[in-house]
């Protein structure tokens, strides 16, 4: 009888321990993933200019733009404080216009969303006004009000108003009517219906409308400042630099428009989403700016 060598390997069960990551760690990783493509693009741009593939007099390198921005921010010469003043002026105009649009568009949007008859009558007007560029009103407003903050703020207001209004209406109309009926049948007041059903249920679409409205207003601001600003604003700075062929200053203005827009998108609206949509609906209804 042949002897068989049987080797028995006794192995204990593998225990995999997953390290739990805290909110701060996840936020840090998300920030890294977000900025990697941007940094990669800037590095490629910088190398292309250094290698001579891109003409620096037309497309200055990121380092040249950053150097010019520092100069405009901290210079003690004639341009002292110019960039900071232009940024604050543009922010003032855009935020005033956006707040005014919220004060008018959101209540009107809820009223039209609740009333099908009113929405039916005004829907054709919204269909005409929504795709109309707000900057198209600038020449008319220049004739009426002249150059200055009033014209710019009204143009930016129009840029934000219709997207916010339309999103509010659609958000309210998307609410499940059965939820309203249930609360009303249980004796719920109008205020309870609004705060417990209409507002939470319509908020995902509403915040998307706020993002779109602010983006429209911010883009419109640049064109309005180029046409109607008297002496300050990022749009004015970009347009004025054209007279001196100061391309680097133009790119500084463009860069800060992008940075401020991104800060508003992820700082303001991202925080609002975390405090409301993520809390009430979970991550399934979060938008792109989570």
Image: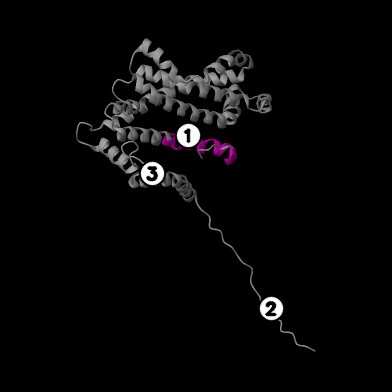
* Residue, far top: 144
Q: With respect to residue 278, does 170 lie above or below?
A: above
Report x, y in % for residue 265. 46, 35
With 271 as the anchor, is 118 left or right in this view? right
Give, as a single range, the part of the protein colored magenta.
262-284
Cα gap from disc 2 to disc 3, whole angstroms: 61 Å
Q: Quadrant of residue 284?
A: top right
**Mark 2 in CB contact with mark 3 (< 8 angstroms):** no
Q: Earlier in the sequence, mark 2 or mark 3?
A: 2
**Mark 1 in CB contact with mark 2 (< 8 angstroms):** no
Image point (52%, 28%), residue name: 209
Q: Element under label 2?
A: loop
Residue 253 within the magenta-colored segment of the rendering: no
Q: Earlier in the sequence, mark 1 or mark 3?
A: 3
Decide which of 273, 240 is in the foreground and name it.
Answer: 240
Q: Residues within 10 Å of mark 1 (few under 14, many from 20)?
A: some
Q: Main secondary structure of the magenta part?
A: helix
Q: Quadrant of residue 230?
A: top left
With 194 as the anchor, is 151 left or right in this view? left
Q: Quadrant of residue 227?
A: top left
Q: Element under label 3?
A: helix
Check disc 1 and report the residue beneath it: 269
With 231 as the anchor, is 158 left or right in this view? right
Report x, y in % for residue 55. 33, 39
Check disc 2 and report the residue beneath it: 8
Q: With respect to residue 10, does 108 lie above or below?
A: above
Decide which of 134, 202 is in the foreground and name it.
Answer: 134
């Amino acid at each position: 009888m042949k002897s068989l060598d049987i080797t028995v390997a006794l192995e204990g069960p593998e225990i995999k321990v997953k390290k739990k990551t805290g909110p701060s760690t996840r936020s840090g990783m998300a920030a890294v993933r977000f900025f990697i493509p941007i940094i990669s693009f800037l590095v490629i741009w910088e190398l292309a200019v250094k290698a001579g593939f891109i003409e620096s007099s037309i497309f200055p390198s990121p380092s040249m733009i950053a150097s010019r921005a520092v100069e405009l921010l901290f210079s003690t010469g004639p341009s002292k404080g110019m960039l900071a003043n232009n940024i604050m002026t543009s922010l003032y105009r855009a935020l005033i216009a956006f707040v005014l649009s919220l004060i008018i568009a959101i209540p009107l949007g809820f009223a039209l969303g609740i009333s099908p008859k009113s929405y039916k009558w005004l829907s054709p007007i919204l269909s005409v006004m929504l795709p109309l560029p707000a900057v198209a009103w600038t020449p008319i407003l220049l004739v009426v009000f002249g150059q200055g903050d009033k014209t710019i703020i009204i143009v930016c207001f129009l840029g934000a108003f219709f997207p916010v209004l339309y999103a509010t209406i659609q958000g309210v109309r998307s609410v499940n009517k059965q939820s309203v009926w249930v609360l009303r049948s249980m004796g719920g007041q109008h205020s309870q219906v609004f705060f417990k059903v209409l507002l939470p249920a319509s908020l995902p679409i509403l915040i998307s409308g706020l993002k779109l409205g602010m983006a429209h207003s911010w883009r419109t601001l640049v064109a309005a400042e180029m046409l109607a600003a008297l002496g300050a604003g990022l749009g004015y700075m970009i347009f004025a630099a054209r007279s001196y062929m100061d391309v680097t200053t133009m790119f500084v203005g463009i860069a800060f428009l992008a940075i401020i827009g991104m800060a508003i998108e992820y700082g303001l609206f991202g925080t609002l989403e975390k405090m409301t949509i993520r809390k009430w609906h979970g991550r399934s209804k979060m938008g792109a700016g989570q």
